[in-house]
Image (spheres, rainbow, N blue to C red):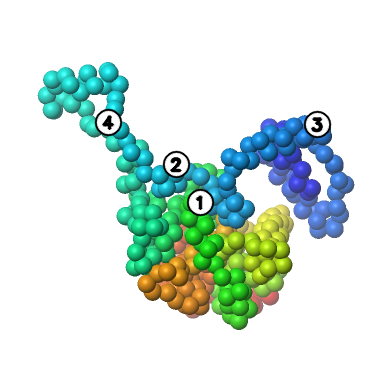
Amino acid sequence: MFWNKLNDSYWPKYVPERYYLAAETHLDDLVEQKVQPPFWGELVPSEVLDAKVLLEESESEQDDASDESAWSDAGKESPEDNADDEEVSITAESSPRRRKRSSSHVSAPDQPPVKRSRQDVRRDSRSPLAQKRYSQLTADDKTVVETPGDDVTSWQCHGVRFKRSDPSLKEESQTPGFPAYTPKRHDLDLLKARFNPDAFYAFLIAELPWQRMYADRVKELYFHRLSDLSDAETAFMGEMDNFMHENSRAFWTALHWVILLQGDPGSVAAKIYVRRRKAHESVSKRMATLIRRYLKKGVRASLFQEPGVWKFPAKVCCWILEDPLASLTHSLLEQLANLDLEEPARVQWAHCITEETRIAHLPADIRSRLIPAGQRDLISNAL
């Protein structure tokens, strides 16, 4: 597990989960002791690996998902993706048995209901703008940010089509409260084309939005009293605050993930691409390790639900930049302000219109413990 070699073998899927949990705990202990496990080497014979590589190369032509789409989990193809890009005509041709049945004299009340085709169902589950190709959109259409209903599976934002993540699939499940949707695979090129790496980098350096997010963080305990915290819980609050401060850029980037083309080595786009990917992998792993370490020390799980304790999303949250061909456009600073206002989870719920909005995504038993405003303890008093 430490050397990321388990995926090279075929037997890990047969191992009960409890053994992996025990191994993770042991690895956490080794990390604390700064002990590195010995290298295992290859778990699969070289001749088997060679055969696997040849097989993957033979299938590579069928895999057209880009590195960026794979990283953001936006590149997974679904039936709706293909339905959006190909308007399949459904013919009226049927089998002889079906034609015979349709020509028989049966009274209308006895006729079975007409079955709707899967294509019709898909089209009905998409918003009107999501049913259009990009070439069919007007300049005004490209300014629209649709708010989908519960029965809508595909909608449009700034000329780009979206789909919901499937909560039943573990690989697509999102951390509660964070945006759980992703751009459609066929529209990723639109996003890459409208990204200006030089302008975006200049904006980041000028504004440093992650520093503002940390400065504006929730600073009160909503569900706990300082006097009730154990020594381990007090230590966790201090270490977590330092972790948030030191890694605020990685938190912000994961919540404002821009789809971009990597570009040539040494280019601004390549530097942005590589830096954020490395930071994302590092911070997500260290965050999980920190949580597990304090759980073992007896820290209550409810403490991790505090709004002042940042969460690292399981899936990156895409920031859809405006289409430069739209009839109305805004600066990057204005776009960011509008995005964070519409989806306060992107700034860890620092700016919410109501207290109910800030804690709406939390479990009911946690919300029931809400301490009234004006009676809450400051987190800084625990640091």
Q: What residue type is labelled 1?
A: Arg
Marks 1 and 3, Cα distance to the nearest angstrom?
A: 35 Å
Given residues 179 and 276, the one toward you in this image is 276
Marks 4 and 3, Cα distance to the nearest angstrom?
A: 53 Å
- Residue at numbered disc 2: 79
Given residues 383 and 14, the one toward you in this image is 14
Label 1 SS: helix
Q: Is residue 250 left or right of residue 358?
A: right
Q: What residue type is labelled 3?
A: Glu
- Residue at numbered disc 3: 47
Of callouts 4 and 1, the N-terminal one: 4
Residue at (79, 48) in percent of width and height:
3
Residue at (57, 59) in percent of width and height:
316
**4 vs 2, front mark:** 4
Specify the label residue 185 is tagged with: 1
Specify the label residue 196 is tagged with: none
Marks 1 and 2, Cα distance to the nearest angstrom?
A: 11 Å
Which quarter shows the N terminus? top right
Residue 229 point in image, percent of width and height = 64, 67
Which quarter shows the C terminus? bottom right
Label 2 SS: helix
Of callouts 4 and 2, the N-terminal one: 2
Label 4 SS: loop
Q: How crowded is mark 2: few (under 14 residues within 10 Å), some or many (20 or more)?
A: few
